[in-house]
Image (spheres, coloured by chain):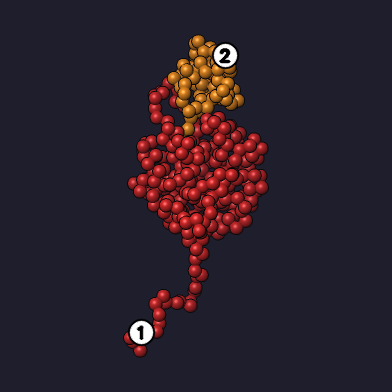
Amino acid sequence: MQLYINGETRRVDQVSNVADLIAMLSLTGRRIAVEVNESIVPRTRHATTTLNEGDRVEIVHAIGGG
Amino acid sequence: MSIDSRWDTPLHIAGRTFTSRLLVGTGKYRDLEETGAAVAASGAEIVTVAVRRSNIGQNPDEPNLLDVISPERYTILPNTAGCYNARDAVRTCQLARELLDGHNLVKLEVLGNDHTLYPNVMETLSAARTLVEDGFDVMVYTSDDPIVAAELESIGCCAVMPLGSLIGSGHGLLNPHALSLIIDNARVPVLVDAGIGTPSDAAMAMELGCDGVLVNSAIAHARQPILMASAMKKAVEAGREARLAERMGRKTYAASPSSPTEGLITG
C-alpha cells in the first residue's frame, strides 16, 4: 500500500491500521500525534483506524520553539 | 524565590494559577540539556514548544523535548509558530491537543511573512474564533494595536500577547505607549511576547503593568543562556515588584536632594 507520510510517498507492507504503522516506524510509545487525511486520530483509536491506499498521514511531535 | 504574597497575587490564566510571571520558549538552544537547564534556571512554569513533523526513519531513539520539559512539571504551551493562515494554525492546535493528551491551552500565532514574522491579525482573529469555539484556551500573539487586542479578548482569548518588537529581534519595547493602552483596557492577562532582548526590557514590560513576559531568543542566544535565564527571572520579579510598589513621580525642575539640606558645613 502506498501512503503519504509527512509529505513523502512511502510504500508499506503488512500495515492495516495506524497502530501497525506506528510500530513499523519504531514510534510506539513515543509522544506523538497522528492525523489521517486531516482528521486527528486519537491515541485510543490507533488500533481501530484502518489505513487505505493513498491516505495522507501526518505524525508530529514537540520540538523546541518560542 | 518569588514575590511575597503580602504584595502580589498569583497569575491566573484560564483557571490555572502561576507564581512565575516569566514564560520561556525552548527554541534555539544548543541541545536539550542546555534547554532543560535554562528553563529550570528561569523559574518559568509555562514553557512553549513547537509542533513539527517527526523525522520518520531517523533516530527513533532520539531524546524527546517532552522527556526534558515534562508535562508533569511544567505547563506546556504549544505554539503555532510557522503558520501563515488560520487553517494551519487551527490544525496545529488540534494536533497539539492530541499530543498532550487533551491539554487545551495553546499559544496562537499566525504570521504575516517570513522576514518580519509580524502577526497577520486578520488570520489570527479568524483562528482565535475557531479555536475558542472548539474549546481551546487561547493565549494569542498579536500586534500592539489596542483595538485588535480588545477584539481578541472579546472573542474569548484567555491572554493577549502583544509584541514588544519583532520576534527574535531583541529590540525591546519599541512602543511602550501602545502596550500601556492595551494593559489599561484589558480584563485578561497581557503578556509581552517577542522582542525582549535583555533583562531591562523584561523589567520595563513588567513596570508598565504587563502580567507577564515571554522570552526565548534573549536567553537562548546569550553567550551563557543559563545565567541569562536567571537574570531574566530576577528582572521580571524586580519589574513586577516595582509596579506593585508604584514608582515616584517624575519631576522636571523641582529637583529634590535625597540628603538633608540643613547642617551643611558651608555657608
Q: Position of residue B36 (x, y in %)?
A: 39, 39
Residue at 45% x, 76% y: name it.
Answer: B255
Rendered position, B190 above or below A44: below
Q: SS for tag 2?
A: loop
Q: Residue lying furthest top in this view?
A: A14
Rendered position, B49 above or below A28: below
- Total labels drawn: 2
Q: Position of residue B42 (x, y in %)?
A: 41, 47
Q: CA distance from mark 2 to mark 1?
A: 93 Å
Instruction: Tell me if label 2 and label 1 are in contact, CB under 8 Å.
Output: no
Mark 2 or mark 1, whichever is nearer to me: 1
Q: Position of residue A8 (x, y in %)?
A: 50, 21
Pointer 1 residue = B264
Q: Residues within 10 Å of mark 2 (few under 14, many from 20)?
A: few
Pointer 2 residue = A53
Residue B198 can be seen in this image? no
Residue at 39% x, 29% y: name it.
Answer: B63
Q: Amino acid at mark 2?
A: Glu
Q: Amino acid at mark 1?
A: Leu
Chain A is which colour? orange
Q: Which chain is red?
A: B
Q: Is B71 placed left or right of B126 in the picture?
A: left
